[in-house]
Image (spheres, rainbow, N blue to C red):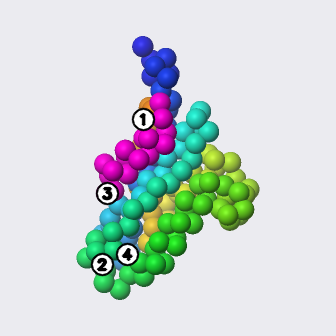
């Protein structure tokens, strides 16, 4: 039986990583982006543990990182609160934009795929498995 016959839909996800000092290439997982086109779903869930962040770099602006993570979450939701990307791009375009390689302290890891019947529950499962 195929995945779709069981009510499961394909999805893509990427882990959001914090790289406080780009030159050292040390990173911790701070969130997950999940996109399910057939389920009309795009969301990010984040979890920032300040003690883990400060173990890599004691000078990190934790509140600045929190604000950047909130901006990623808002971009996923779309609309005016997501900035130009949120209001002018489709869900798929926003996912690709958020997962594009960049040299900032927040980076998306490689995109992976899977099947799920419930994208929201899958996002929480991945956050528990890969971040918390």
- Which corner quadrant of the image does residue 50 belong to? bottom left
Cα separation between marks 1 and 3: 20 Å
Q: Residue at x 33, y 56 (%)?
A: 131
User: Which marked residue is nearer to the observer: mark 3 or mark 2?
Assistant: 3
User: Mark 3 = which residue?
Assistant: 132
Cα separation between marks 2 and 1: 33 Å
Lower position in the chain sequence, tag 1 or tag 3: 1
Q: Residue at x 30, y 78 (%)?
A: 54
User: Does residue 16 appear anywhere in the picture?
Assistant: no
**Front position in the image: 62 or 29:** 62
User: Mark 2 = which residue?
Assistant: 54
Cα separation between marks 3 and 2: 16 Å
* Quadrant assignment for the C terminus: bottom left
Q: Residue at x 65, y 62 (%)?
A: 82
**Front position in the image: 13 or 81:** 81
User: Mark 1 = which residue?
Assistant: 114
Q: Residues within 10 Å of mark 3 (few under 14, many from 20)?
A: few
> Outermost residue toward the left?
55
Cα separation between marks 4 and 2: 9 Å
Indicate whether 109 appears above or below 34: below
Cα separation between marks 4 and 3: 18 Å
The secondary element bearing badge 3 is classed as: loop
Lower position in the chain sequence, tag 4 or tag 2: 4
**Highlighted magenta segment, given as a residue range:** 117-132
**Front position in the image: 103 or 127:** 127
Label of residue 20 in the image: 4
Lower position in the chain sequence, tag 4 or tag 1: 4
Indicate whether 72 appears above or below 94: below
The reply to whether dot 4 and dot 3 touch (C-beta < 8 Å) is no
Lower position in the chain sequence, tag 2 or tag 1: 2
């Amino acid at each position: 039986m195929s995945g779709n016959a069981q009510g499961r839909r394909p999805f893509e996800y990427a882990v959001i990583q914090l790289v406080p000092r780009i030159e050292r290439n040390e990173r911790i997982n701070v969130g997950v982006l999940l996109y399910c086109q057939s389920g009309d779903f795009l969301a990010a869930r984040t979890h920032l543990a300040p003690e883990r962040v400060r173990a890599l770099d004691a000078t990190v602006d934790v509140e600045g990182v929190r604000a950047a993570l909130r901006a990623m979450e808002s971009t996923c939701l779309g609309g005016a609160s997501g900035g130009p990307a949120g209001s002018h791009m489709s869900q798929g375009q926003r996912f690709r934009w958020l997962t594009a390689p960049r040299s900032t302290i927040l980076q998306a890891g490689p995109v992976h795929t899977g099947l799920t019947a419930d994208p929201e529950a899958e996002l929480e499962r991945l956050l528990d498995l890969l971040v918390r």
